[in-house]
Amino acid sequence: MYELHFAVPMAGAVLCTFNTRHDAPMVSALLKHSGAKVFLVESSLLHVGRAALKRIADSESNAASIPVLVTISDDAGQDSGRAADYDYEGLIKSAPSAFDIRWPADELDPITLNYTSGTTSRPKGVVYNHRGAYLNTIGTVLAYDITPMPTYLWTVPMFHCNGWHLPWGVAMQGGTNVCLRHFTAAVIFDTIERHGVTHMGGAPTVLNMIVNAPAADRRPLPGTVRVMTGGAPPPPRVLAGMEELGFAVYHIYGLTETYGPATVCTWMPEWDALPGEERARLKARQGFQHIAMEEADVKDPVTMESVPRDGEAVGEVMFRGNTVMSRYYNDITATKESMAGGWLHTGDLAVRHPDGYIQLKDRAKDIIISGGENISSIEVESVIFSHPAVLEAAVVARPDDHWGETPCAFVKLKDGAIATDAEIIGFCRERLPHFMAPKTVVFEDLPKTSTGKTQKFVLREKARAMGSLTKIVGNNSKL
Amino acid sequence: MYELHFAVPMAGAVLCTFNTRHDAPMVSALLKHSGAKVFLVESSLLHVGRAALKRIADSESNAASIPVLVTISDDAGQDSGRAADYDYEGLIKSAPSAFDIRWPADELDPITLNYTSGTTSRPKGVVYNHRGAYLNTIGTVLAYDITPMPTYLWTVPMFHCNGWHLPWGVAMQGGTNVCLRHFTAAVIFDTIERHGVTHMGGAPTVLNMIVNAPAADRRPLPGTVRVMTGGAPPPPRVLAGMEELGFAVYHIYGLTETYGPATVCTWMPEWDALPGEERARLKARQGFQHIAMEEADVKDPVTMESVPRDGEAVGEVMFRGNTVMSRYYNDITATKESMAGGWLHTGDLAVRHPDGYIQLKDRAKDIIISGGENISSIEVESVIFSHPAVLEAAVVARPDDHWGETPCAFVKLKDGAIATDAEIIGFCRERLPHFMAPKTVVFEDLPKTSTGKTQKFVLREKARAMGSLTKIVGNNSKL
């Protein structure tokens, strides 16, 4: 996937990366929506890829619209492809070395396509262009202080906002990439020591895993390791814990629609002297736009006026500039809605402090962020609704020490119907990527407004009161 | 001048900065050529400014074409302005604070105008645009490794390629600017210590001054001080001397036409282990384009083919990309000539090494052609520089009836050092092919520009005035 971040654009094509956790129905939906011509699949995921292609073949009369499969073999692969498939390494070996780079005709031509949410019914594909990707790469490298010749440890998936643009950023600074197929805290500490890692990224859940690693799994850091975190507001406790271990944490914030990183909590040298808790509180703020984003602001979405810088008035975070997406692919309505008034509306609620720093107060309320990935509660609800025993369902976020949040379903069964929580969860897992399935199911009547709408804020409070599903007991993190 | 790098573009105007050493005739010529509307003059230079305005008034019938004078007072000023003048600080105090920034209508609109050469007859004004200035600022900050919150010591004048774009670059990284009106090696060491300077710039002559500072003038560095050098190829001996003092030297290269810095000699970590002399030799190369310049190449100016990467074939350095100037102001002919074939022709001759690094051999006009052989003045200079008695050296062509030209060296010795011309010539002959060794050595102070570059054209005139070394008498050519 690292190579393809260069090869695909240089071939004049658009790179569309999929979440490795997607199932075959989702993959086939995204292949269709994106109009993919070539489908490159790493061997360990070939069973999903083949099933997705079969779904397309079964529903398509025109064989030309089925993408060509190219298999990428790997030592850890379980399926090395069939004779009929194209083989990635074989294609490279047989390719002419004098191939001329196909430069984009226009710098606003698309370079990548990133699907944001896991809806098979209406996928939202965010289009990045060459200009924006170039600038966001530079903005991220600068915001994150990636000095020349870094050694970068990949824990942020490259399919997520193009790995925060660091496939390009690490290359730009002449760096070394350290890739892991799976990781634990012990593996991270080992890898840092073995390769002299200087930079890494990770959602707050990854930081939490590091902070809570048992002493036996830890290793002293070979030097300062800079960690860029984002994807969800990092809990101050986790930030403070990372600092104690010797990591330098850079807190960034952004959305798929902003090419990934868009703001950085710029650190003021005078804050070094503050107590750890205060430092963590300051660092948990989202900060300012980075150098490549024209403007980040907190606005009243109706009047489009900026909120006062008082740390109290809540508004919506909005962006404009070169590193705001071109559009949602093939979705003019959603594009227009999201860009009303010339600003990208994030749906994130925030305040602006007197020093100008932006701080998120609430995510768009229906979104659940689990392990850095967005989960649409509406989509999970619609699957639960489809269970024959279910009368009503509402899904909200339950706080979680490891994942940040997990989906928690409140379900009312039909009169006389019987279903267990395990049954509902299993039902969802058959129809959704596993991470989207609820981890908790509560059977009860749903609170309603007078007009019959479910009061989600009441359920959110209940879920919050339950506390974390995955508790951290002593030095062991139980998942 | 620092403030004006922001204020003038934000007022929707174009900033044109003048060399502080220009005299009244030159200043009046540039005011006229640029069509300046407002003329801001710092108090210590007010006598030049007034004389320049008087020249314009004497030759202009239309009073509207005389720029408005704004005086900038300073503690060191000798002239605080007259009642009739606008006063800079006074204007700021009386200005409305709610002034809206006048953004450029187009990113290719001009932001600054930089005059390159000191000819009153045909000034060459290089036009920079907003897009290019933004990108070159980022490119320079990255090439030079300007990390957040730097303390930058200004020895490079801000009127020179907009101070290598660092008025913007230092602000971008939240830095502190340390400005000096005049400096010596002692002042530089003092200032570094007092303010904790982290970054500075300087032509090789400034580095030479630092390296040759008497022990009494030196101070230990408070930490690594990163020095960006350029403007002329730095002699390896000077680079090695700086390293010994604890400076980290970044070697950049560019022209006014490339917004200043355009290439950087990217340092490979494995070179750290090489002997000092070898490291200095590698660092004296100009390297590669920085991240904001699309392409730097060495080409045959006739065929426009790239030279082979063999370290021997000489071609002309050419650039293309966002950080190549828009044009010469009001000079379509010069613009077309310099941009023939879509590439900026620098007039600098260079080779390309097998590892891709570009190395300058000479300015086209500085090349000495002796007996049909090209002699790189830079190569001869770097050998003379390595002689222990030598402080500075410049080599130019001396006309010769027999050879066409022969190398003529102008040398300044270190305080108290002694060397004869025969000794210098012998030293060179031991280290260079005989035809490359100077035939003439003149001991004297070298004429400099305000940015510390040796004024080779002055020396060339002197060498020309000497006449031929080998006279042709009758039919006998005496060698």
Image (cartoon, coloured by chain):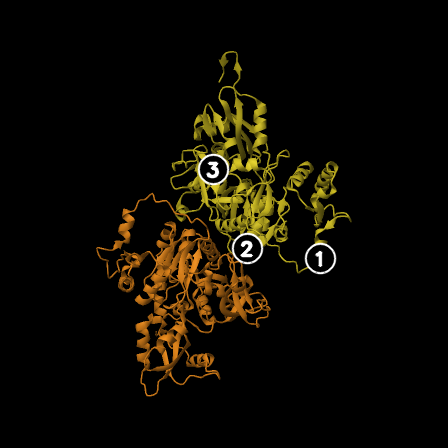
Chain colours: A orange, B yellow
Instruction: Tell me how far mark 2 sits from mark 1, CA to CA.
Output: 26 Å
Residue at the far top: name it: B474
Which chain does the residue under circle 1 lie in?
B
How packed mark 2 is, by other alpha carbons closer than 10 Å (few <14, some 14-19, many 20 or more), is some
How packed mark 3 is, by other alpha carbons closer than 10 Å (few <14, some 14-19, many 20 or more), is few
Asked whether A202 or A20 is in front, the reply is A20
Q: Secondary structure at mark 1?
A: helix
Instruction: Tell me how far mark 2 sits from mark 3, CA to CA.
Output: 35 Å
B10 horizontally vs B315: left or right:
right
Name the amino acid, label 1.
Lys
Q: Is residue A477 above or below residue B435?
A: below
Instruction: Please identify, in this view, whether the residue under mark 2 or under mark 3 is nearer the observer.
Output: 3
Tell me whether marks 2 and 3 sit on the same chain.
yes
Name the amino acid, label 3.
Gly
Instruction: Tell me how far mark 1 sits from mark 3, CA to CA.
Output: 50 Å
Residue at the far bottom: name it: A416
Q: Which residue was labeled with disc 2?
A: B172
Q: Is residue B10 above or below residue A267?
A: above
Residue at the far front: name it: A61
**Which of the labelled discs sits on residue B93, or is there none?**
1
B11 horizontally vs A269: left or right:
right
**Which of the labelled discs sits on residue B341, or is there none?**
3
Asked whether B469 or A169 is in front, the reply is A169
Asked whether A345 or B299 is in front, the reply is A345
Q: Earlier in the sequence, mark 2 or mark 3?
A: 2
Image coordinates of residue A460 in percent, x first then y, are: 45, 79
Tell me whether marks 2 and 1 sit on the same chain.
yes
How packed mark 1 is, by other alpha carbons closer than 10 Å (few <14, some 14-19, many 20 or more), is few
Q: Secondary structure at mark 3?
A: helix
Do labels 2 and 3 touch, CB within 8 Å? Answer: no
Picture quarter containing residue B281?
A: top left
Which chain does the residue under circle 2 lie in?
B
